[in-house]
Image (cartoon, rainbow, N blue to C red):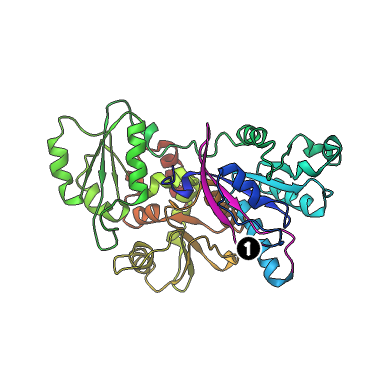
């Protein structure tokens, strides 16, 4: 259970004022003392993540946050960080002290949830301290009364009812986009081509590769894994052609030359562009590469933090290819981890990584922010395929997206 990555878990964020019992609620939900509890307001400063399992939802991530009413400059920054979590939250638990009136603070969170299209529940905590519990529910705004659950975290009362409410309120489509299972049939063969270079982690595969293997198996298909230099040998040993070949984007040129034209070819990065975001929008962003001019600013967004090498895809390979494509130097900026600049207006293009460390809501929010400002956004694999002139080839598994790309190419 604990090995499921954060990006593959449904994110449930607890928001509320200081000292309403958010940390106590996480402790009772998880059945362990995982969050620090104190009567002193402001004990929780930065978001705290706790993994657990809720059947039938599966692995979820509970996120404890600082009080939205935290004061002072530091408190203001903590509150802003808490609110920003809405961008990658699948369900919000707005925790309210049942002994205190529903206020403008809670109304602000309700407003933000609606603006971000975030499902939410109102958790009335400290219910054991209230003599007239029906009256507590009556004091809530009518339009959110049906979303309220009365509990006592310290007494463990109402927790079962809250868990059922979480199950009922959870978005049913939060992670239902397959990686590859819908592209293959029963018993068909998928070949995964995995280069091993200086940027590869020692003694293991990277997360997208592992997740893709599992998704192929979930599709009742077979998977073979090889290095690029052994692809031809692997193809020769098969009695029939594979249904699909998936390669690391960095090996596009050598792999596409070896794969028969009637075999679908794509990359892990392209599969995750569809899994985590909107593949069609990313492909549109690739067409903007041809409009770049020397001196333009380009943002490269990486959701993981890793040591860079001379073979790094986002800091070396893609920048070098883009410099050559535009015939001059571009100005690159890099954003790492969960940092995503607010001043996107300055950039002519955003190039995003595969996003294996963020969930779909976060990726879609990033894409939406770029589109609001009319800034094209593309991801690593699609950019590499475009720069190497093989984007139509690696979009073969997605005929609708391929057709839209061709029409956009003709329009230009």
Residue nearest the viewer, comparing 273 with 32:
32
Q: Looking at the image, which residue sits at the far front? A: 155
Q: Looking at the image, which residue sits at the far top? A: 186
Look at 33% across and 45% down and name the residue there: 210
The answer to if 46 sits in the magenta stretch is: yes
Residue nearest the viewer, comparing 85 with 97:
97
Report which residue position mark 1 lands on.
45
Query: Helix or strand or loop: what does disc 1 sit on?
Result: loop
Look at 67% across and 70% down and name the residue there: 74
- Say left or right for 217 vs 24: left
Q: Which residues are magenta?
A: 43-71
For label 1, the crowd category at 10 Å Cα-Cα, with few meaning under 14, some 14 to 19 and many 20 or more, is: some
Residue nearest the viewer, comparing 30 with 335:
30
Q: Is residue 388 above or below residue 52?
A: below
- Say left or right for 247 vs 117: left
Q: Name the spot of residue 25 as percent of width and height, x first.
A: 65, 46
Quadrant for residue 19, please give it: bottom right
Q: Name the spot of residue 320 as percent of width and height, x first.
A: 34, 68
The answer to if 385 sits in the magenta stretch is: no
Q: Name the spot of residue 341 as percent of width and height, x first.
A: 56, 65
Q: Name the spot of residue 130 as percent of width and height, x first.
A: 82, 42
Does residue 279 appear in the picture of this structure?
Answer: no
Q: Which quadrant does the N terminus fall into?
A: top left
Look at 71% across and 47% down and name the residue there: 95
- Say left or right for 373 vs 67: left
């Amino acid at each position: 259970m604990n090995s499921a990555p954060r990006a593959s878990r449904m994110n449930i964020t607890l928001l509320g004022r200081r000292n309403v019992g958010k940390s106590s609620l996480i402790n009772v939900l998880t059945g362990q003392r995982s969050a620090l509890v104190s009567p002193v307001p402001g004990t929780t400063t930065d978001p705290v993540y706790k993994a657990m399992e809720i059947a039938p939802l599966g692995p979820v991530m509970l996120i404890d946050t600082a009080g939205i009413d935290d004061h002072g400059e530091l408190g203001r920054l903590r509150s802003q960080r808490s609110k920003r979590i809405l961008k990658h939250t699948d369900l919000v638990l707005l925790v309210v002290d049942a002994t205190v009136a529903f206020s403008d603070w809670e109304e602000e969170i309700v407003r933000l949830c609606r603006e971000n299209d975030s499902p939410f529940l109102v958790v009335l905590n400290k219910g054991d301290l209230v003599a007239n519990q029906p009256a507590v529910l009556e004091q809530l705004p009518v339009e959110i009364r049906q979303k309220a659950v009365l509990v006592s975290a310290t007494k463990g009362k109402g927790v079962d009812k809250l868990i059922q409410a979480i199950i009922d309120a959870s978005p049913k489509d939060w992670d239902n986009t397959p990686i590859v299972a819908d592209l293959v049939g029963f018993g068909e063969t998928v070949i995964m081509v995995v280069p091993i270079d200086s940027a590869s982690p020692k003694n293991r595969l990277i997360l997208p590769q592992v997740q893709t293997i599992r998704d192929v198996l979930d599709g009742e298909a077979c998977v073979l894994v090889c290095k690029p230099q052994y692809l031809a040998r692997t193809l020769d040993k098969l009695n029939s052609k594979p249904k699909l070949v998936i390669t690391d984007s960095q090996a596009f040129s050598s792999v596409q030359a070896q794969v028969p034209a009637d075999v679908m070819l794509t990359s892990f990065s392209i599969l995750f562009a569809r899994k985590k975001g909107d593949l069609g929008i990313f492909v549109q962003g690739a067409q903007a590469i041809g409009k770049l001019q020397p001196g333009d600013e380009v943002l490269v967004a990486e959701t993981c933090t890793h040591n860079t090498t001379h073979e790094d895809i986002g800091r070396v390979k893609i920048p070098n290819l883009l410099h050559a494509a535009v015939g001059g130097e571009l100005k690159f900026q890099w954003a790492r981890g969960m940092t995503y600049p607010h001043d996107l207006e300055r950039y002519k293009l955003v190039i995003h990584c595969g996003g294996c460390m963020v969930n779909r809501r976060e990726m879609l929010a990033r894409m939406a922010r770029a589109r609001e400002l009319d800034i094209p956004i593309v991801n690593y694999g699609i950019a590499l395929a475009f720069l190497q002139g093989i984007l139509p080839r690696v979009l073969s598994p997605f005929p609708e997206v391929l057709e839209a790309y061709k029409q956009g190419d003709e329009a230009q």
